[in-house]
Amino acid sequence: MFDLGGFGDELAWGFVLTLGVGVGALAVALAFGLAGAALKLSPRLALRFAGFVYTTVVRGIPELVLIIVLYYGVPHVAQNFMRLFIDGFRLDFNPVVTAILVIGMIYGAFMTEVLRGAFLAVPRGQLEAARAFGMSRMRTFWRIHMPQMWRFALPGIGNVWMVLIKATALVSVVGLHDILFWADRAGQSLREPFKFFFAAAVAFLVITYISERVLAVAEARAARGVRTVRR
Amino acid sequence: MDFALIQTSLPALGQGLVMTLGLTAFAVPVGFCIAIPLALARLSHHRALAGFSRAFIYLFRGTPLLIQLYLIYYGLGQFRAALESVALWWFFRDALSCALLVLVLNTGAYAGEIFRGAIAGVDAGQIEAARAAGMSWFVRTRRIVLPQALRIAWPAYTNEVVFLMQATSLVSLVTVTELFRSADIIAVRTFKIYTMYLTVAAIYLMISYAIIFAFGLVERRLMRHLGPAAPGRSIHARALAILTR
């Protein structure tokens, strides 16, 4: 399309890193979201309060501040925690893994609300029927509750993904070699910053465009068992 | 936590806070003034108008704010000669004006999408009745459509304003000394990194809550036709409910 002055492969690797961090963080966010939803739906007040603190604090603080605090803080806290048990324990965190964990932890708070709403949206009759059939609580959860929850959760998960993938651009601030980092480097060394930042912007537009399409298909598939009425 | 340091750095943090609040207070109303025409254009039957609005919203919602900031502040430096020839260089040379421009356009696009949904959500019967009463497009949009759309959009718009306030922390990366950068400068100089970062985190949390609370008061006024607010839920409870939604 246009000449990237020999920085094409670095940008491509940066693109791969951006996507990798995004997909990894989405998985972590889903795990945190499930745990958070379990907390918020718990009958115990203390657990509900813990879930409330998690989502409120994370949503009230800018991503940039959270990423910087957690990126440098999580390995530190984990290492000090392990030192309580093992003397002189040293923890070498991979920067990419740390970034995935940190972004996953942040967007897990947003995912918590999506999944909580989705679990509540499954009609109670479905769960009561499963229990009446003699299914155990665990089996009701895995066979009935969880599969039906996804249909309600998908649009929300899609929204979280769209915000999350754009937030991965912030990992360039803590020194990860993502697409924005390489765009910045290339732009500085060739004195053509606009061209390279523009290329990075186009890369994100491609990701969001493809995501929109994939999500539309996934939502249609998740709703395939739902009776539709012509209005 | 080093409380003495927090105390001595309060004046610097206060200046940063003023900048953060100033950026927000400028970008929100100006962005609102862009968002309404964008939303109306997006729903217009005029193809070029709808297409322009669609492309604008897609471009700003599809790329990270950080890239938009870099593109305008660092990127446009590449075209310095051209910008000087049209006497616009003074604007794009200044980090603050670039930051304001990007924040305004960005929040305009996000709010535009929120208002598009809200305007489309206004009951069709209301518009038909306004038409039957002989109102022109301008009159019924101003008197019937927008006031009702504002009610529908308000909770989502509250979220957008909170996100914009938080997003102003990104302009620290194009050298504007707002709240985060003012804390960062002290953190790097004194090595008391966590004291400073956790302090600004707490300040951001308080501003987020204050915005939600203030917008909740407006919401109560917008919804006054529904009678007293839901019993047993104070405005604090509703503010927290929005923050954790």
Image (cartoon, helix red, strand yellow):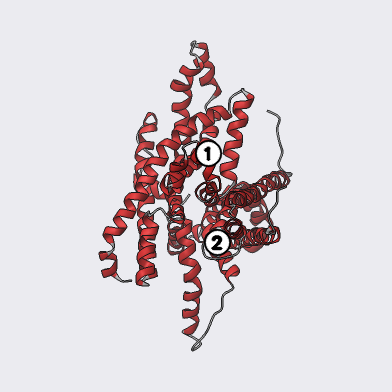
Mark 2 lies on residue:
A171
- Three-letter code, disc 2: Val
Quarter that holds the C terminus of chain A: top right
Residue found at x 51% / y 17%? B137
How far apart are the alpha carbons under marks 2 and 1?
A: 24 Å
Residue closer to the observer: A213 or B216: A213
Q: Is residue B105 above or below residue A139?
A: above
Q: Position of residue B103 (x, y in %)?
A: 46, 44
Q: Is residue A40 visible?
A: yes
Q: Chain of mark 2?
A: A
- In the picture, the disc for residue B109 is 1
Crowding at mark 2 (Cα within 10 Å: few <14, some 14-19, many 20+):
many
SS at mark 1 in the image:
helix
SS at mark 2 in the image:
helix
Residue closer to the observer: B85 or B180: B85
Residue found at x 37% / y 55%? B179
- In the picture, the disc for residue B70 is none
- State yes or no: discs 2 and 1 in contact (Cβ < 8 Å): no
Q: Is residue A214 above or below residue A98?
A: above
Q: How many marks?
A: 2
Badge 2 and badge 1 both on one subunit:
no
Q: Position of residue A12 (x, y in %)?
A: 69, 59
Residue found at x 29% / y 65%? B6
Residue lying furthest bottom: A87
Q: Is residue B159 visible?
A: no
Q: Position of residue A46 (x, y in %)?
A: 43, 64
Q: Is residue A57 above or below residue A195?
A: below
